[in-house]
């Protein structure tokens, strides 16, 4: 198959969808890989490294889209890319269609096959192409929190681990999923006193078993949250209710009960945020202060560490990309239900329920395209 890897053009996006190691793997299976010049630069991969791995470098985004049967990307296409996407071209990337009606209509019009990273789903309902970014954001939340706790950044001026004779900081983690678990591990490793709160007792039991002794678990409810925020130095928001906006667990009135200089990192900001006072920020201007509480609400946290994020993402996407390239999208999706669930739009038809519902569009049975019998 002819594969194209364009340079990401969304603001502040430095990741790339295929690494030189990925190119070598695709080449080994007999595919041709065309990489747009400079596509890997932001993640530390020079054009010459791609050439050594067997890729051909194309000078422009137009040439890259123009030649490819399958485009592998990171972020959803933006307006200037809509016209480059062709009928029957397979586009494998994050789309997040339910949050953009314009993108949905543009991809319907293109008649391309849109396979979305975010809806590829395993039988245990986990989302294998979202997990790596949650791992990065969870770990980064502690790094960012530690930085903004410094006095020069208007934080409390407390060191997470303390020192001999001085107590460590208190870190409160809301949500014990992927983000929360990684955050708690990092904070505990730095020596902080950590409490993880979740509504799932099964999850809390698991965390209690695997976490080090400086991590406590506590059931999440308003009463407990109200009490815990008063002694916290750093609060991480990592809750998720699938398919819904994040619940507002920390309300405006709670801020006045906190210590001045407390830092709150709202990782769930991409789902609306789990603090009432959260609003999305960027890496260029990541924090703002309300009632002496520092808020960090960057919606694209992994973007700050593109080297790690690119490797983490491509470790997960490459096995799927290989199946698509080796078998073609129809056979690959027929044989792998996880991939099949990634299909969102095919030749102008919406085949993913969440997207059809979001924009009130007719839902077409994906089996019409996969030539499977419809099960009634
Ligand atoms: N800002 C970023 O750059 C970035 C990056 C990656 C992920 N995220 C976001 O981080 C959030 C968490 O992602 P995840 O992968 O850890 O999700 P996850 O599903 O693994 O974990 C979410 C956890 O929240 C818990 N929860 C639900 N309601 C709760 C409540 N009221 N109190 C306490 N816990 C509650 C769930 O039981 C679950 O354990 C998501 O919104 C995700 O989109 C943001």
Image (spheres, rainbow, N blue to C red):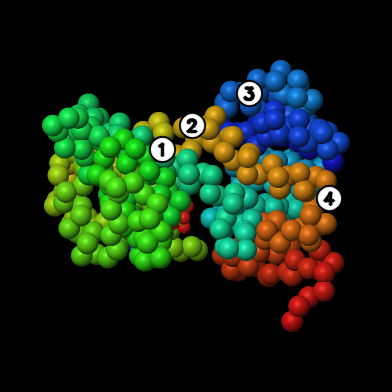
Q: Could you say where residue 226 lies in the image, as x and y percent from the top left?
A: 19, 59
Lower position in the chain sequence, tag 3 or tag 4: 3
Which residue, given by chain and number where applicable, does mark 3 sit on? 45
Which residue, given by chain and number where applicable, does mark 4 sit on? 327
- Disc number placed over residue 140 in the picture, else none: 1
Dot 3 alpha-carbon crowd within 10 angstroms: few under 14, some 14 to 19, many 20 or more: some
Which residue, given by chain and number where applicable, does mark 2 sit on? 305
Dot 2 alpha-carbon crowd within 10 angstroms: few under 14, some 14 to 19, many 20 or more: some
Using the image, determine if residue 315 lies above or below residue 357: above
Is the CB of mark 1 within 8 Å of ligand 1?
no
Using the image, determine if residue 355 lies above or below residue 131: below
Lower position in the chain sequence, tag 1 or tag 4: 1
Q: Is residue 344 visible?
A: no
Is the CB of mark 3 within 8 Å of ligand 1?
no
Lower position in the chain sequence, tag 3 or tag 1: 3
Between marks 1 and 4, how big is the CA–CA gap?
A: 37 Å
Between marks 2 and 4, how big is the CA–CA gap?
A: 33 Å
Between marks 2 and 1, how big is the CA–CA gap?
A: 9 Å
Q: Is residue 18 visible?
A: yes
Residue appearing at x 78%, y 26% in the figure: 55
Total numbered badges shown on the rendered structure: 4
C-beta proximity under 8 Å, tags 2 and 1: yes
């Amino acid at each position: 198959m002819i594969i194209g890897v364009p340079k990401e053009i969304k603001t502040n996006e430095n990741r790339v969808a295929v690494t030189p190691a990925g190119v070598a793997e695709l080449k080994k299976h007999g595919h041709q890989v065309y990489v747009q010049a400079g596509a890997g630069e932001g993640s530390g991969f020079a054009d010459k490294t791609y050439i050594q791995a067997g890729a051909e470098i194309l000078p422009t985004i137009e040439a890259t889209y123009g030649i490819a049967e399958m485009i592998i990307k990171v972020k959803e296409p933006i307006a200037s890319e809509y016209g480059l996407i062709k009928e029957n071209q397979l586009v494998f990337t994050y789309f997040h269609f339910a949050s953009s009606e314009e993108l949905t209509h543009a991809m319907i019009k293109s008649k391309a096959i849109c396979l979305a990273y975010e809806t590829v789903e395993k039988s245990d309902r986990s989302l294998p192409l979202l997990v790596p970014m949650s791992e990065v954001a969870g770990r980064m939340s502690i790094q960012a929190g530690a930085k903004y706790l410094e006095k020069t950044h208007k934080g409390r001026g407390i060191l997470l681990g303390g020192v001999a004779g001085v107590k460590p900081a208190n870190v409160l983690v809301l949500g014990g999923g992927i983000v929360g678990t990684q955050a708690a591990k990092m904070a505990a490793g730095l020596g902080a006193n950590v409490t993880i709160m979740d509504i799932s007792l099964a999850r809390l039991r698991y965390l209690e078993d695997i976490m080090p002794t400086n991590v406590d678990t506590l059931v999440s409810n308003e009463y407990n949250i109200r009490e815990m925020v008063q002694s916290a130095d750093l609060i991480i928001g990592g809750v998720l209710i699938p398919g819904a906006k994040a619940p507002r667990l920390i309300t405006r009135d709670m801020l006045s009960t906190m210590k001045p200089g407390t830092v709150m990192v709202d990782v769930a900001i991409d789902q609306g945020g789990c603090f009432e006072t959260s609003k999305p920020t960027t890496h260029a201007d990541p924090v703002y202060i309300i009632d002496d509480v520092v808020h960090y609400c960057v919606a694209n946290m992994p973007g700050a560490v593109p080297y790690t994020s690119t490797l983490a993402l491509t470790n997960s996407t490459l096995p799927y990309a290989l199946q698509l390239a080796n078998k073609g999208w129809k056979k690959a999706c027929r044989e792998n239900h996880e991939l099949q669930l990634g299909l969102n739009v095919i030749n102008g038809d919406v085949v993913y329920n969440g997207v059809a519902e979001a924009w009130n569009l007719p839902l077409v049975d994906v089996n019409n395209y996969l030539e499977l019998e419809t099960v009634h």
